[in-house]
C-alpha cells in the first residue's frame, strides 16, 4: 500500500477528537492498510488515523514484528481496572522521546472490525496500555497530557532539542 506522512507534535490536529466510522468499505480497508504500512515505516507499534491527518476512529496495533496486526474501528473502553501499571510510552508523532505513564493494568474494549462487526477484547500488559493510549489519541488527548506538568515540559524540551539537531528535511 502506501506510507503516508505522520503529523508531528505540536500539530493542532492531534488535539482534535476523531469522528466515528459509519461506512465500512474498500476505502476503510485501504486506510487501515496504509496506516499499517506507515506505522511499520515509523517503527511504531500503534497508530491512529488522526496521526496521518484523518479524523476517523481507526486504530492499528502490531505489538511485535512477528505478531498479527489488528485493526480496531470505533474502539471504546468498556471497563478499566483500578489496578495501575507503569510503562514507557511515546508516539509516532513525537519520535525519539518516551516517558513512563501510569494507566489501568487491564481493560475491556468494544470495537468493530473492518466489516462493521462488533467485538469485545480484554487486554492486559502492553496491549492494554496501547488501547488506552490510542483511544486517548482518538479523543484528542495526546499522550504527554497524562504526565505531570514538570515531566511534560521536560519531554517537550527533549523533543525540541532532537528536532533542532536533525538536518533540514
Image: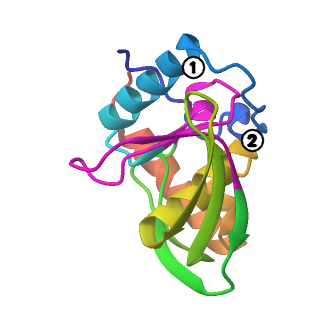
Q: Quadrant of residue 106?
A: bottom right
Point 56% across, 36% down: residue:
113
Point out which mark residue 28 bears.
Answer: 1
Q: Is residue 11 magenta?
A: no
User: Which of 20 and 48 lies nearest the eye of the viewer?
Assistant: 20
Q: Quadrant of the C terminus?
A: top left
Point 45% across, 73% down: residue:
125
Point 39% across, 49% down: residue:
45
Q: Position of residue 27 (x, y in %)?
A: 56, 12
Q: Quadrant of the N terminus?
A: top left
Residue at the limit of the structure toward the front, as seen here: 117
Q: Position of residue 47 (x, y in %)?
A: 50, 40
| Highlighted magenta segment, given as a residue range | 47-76
Q: Position of residue 64 (x, y in %)?
A: 28, 53
Secondary element at image label 2:
helix
Residue bearing the label numbered 2: 15
**How much space separates mark 1 and mark 2, taking CA atoms?**
22 Å
Secondary element at image label 1:
helix
Amino acid at each position: 500500500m502506501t506510507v503516508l506522512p505522520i503529523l508531528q507534535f505540536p500539530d493542532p490536529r492531534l488535539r482534535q477528537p476523531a469522528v466515528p466510522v459509519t461506512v465500512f468499505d474498500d476505502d476503510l480497508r485501504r486506510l487501515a492498510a496504509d496506516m499499517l504500512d506507515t506505522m511499520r515505516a515509523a517503527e511504531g507499534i500503534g497508530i491512529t488515523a488522526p496521526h496521518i491527518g484523518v479524523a476517523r476512529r481507526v486504530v492499528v496495533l502490531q505489538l511485535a514484528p512477528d505478531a498479527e496486526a489488528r485493526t480496531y474501528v470505533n474502539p471504546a473502553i468498556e471497563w478499566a481496572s483500578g489496578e495501575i501499571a507503569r510503562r514507557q510510552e511515546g508516539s509516532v508523532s513525537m519520535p525519539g522521546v518516551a516517558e513512563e505513564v501510569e494507566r489501568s493494568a487491564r481493560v475491556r474494549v468494544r470495537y468493530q472490525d473492518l466489516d462493521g462487526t462488533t467485538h469485545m477484547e480484554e487486554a492486559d500488559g502492553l496491549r492494554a496500555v496501547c488501547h488506552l493510549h490510542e483511544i486517548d489519541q482518538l479523543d484528542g488527548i495526546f499522550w504527554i497530557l497524562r504526565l505531570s506538568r514538570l515531566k511534560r515540559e521536560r519531554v517537550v524540551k527533549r523533543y525540541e532539542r532532537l528536532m533542532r539537531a536533525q538536518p533540514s528535511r
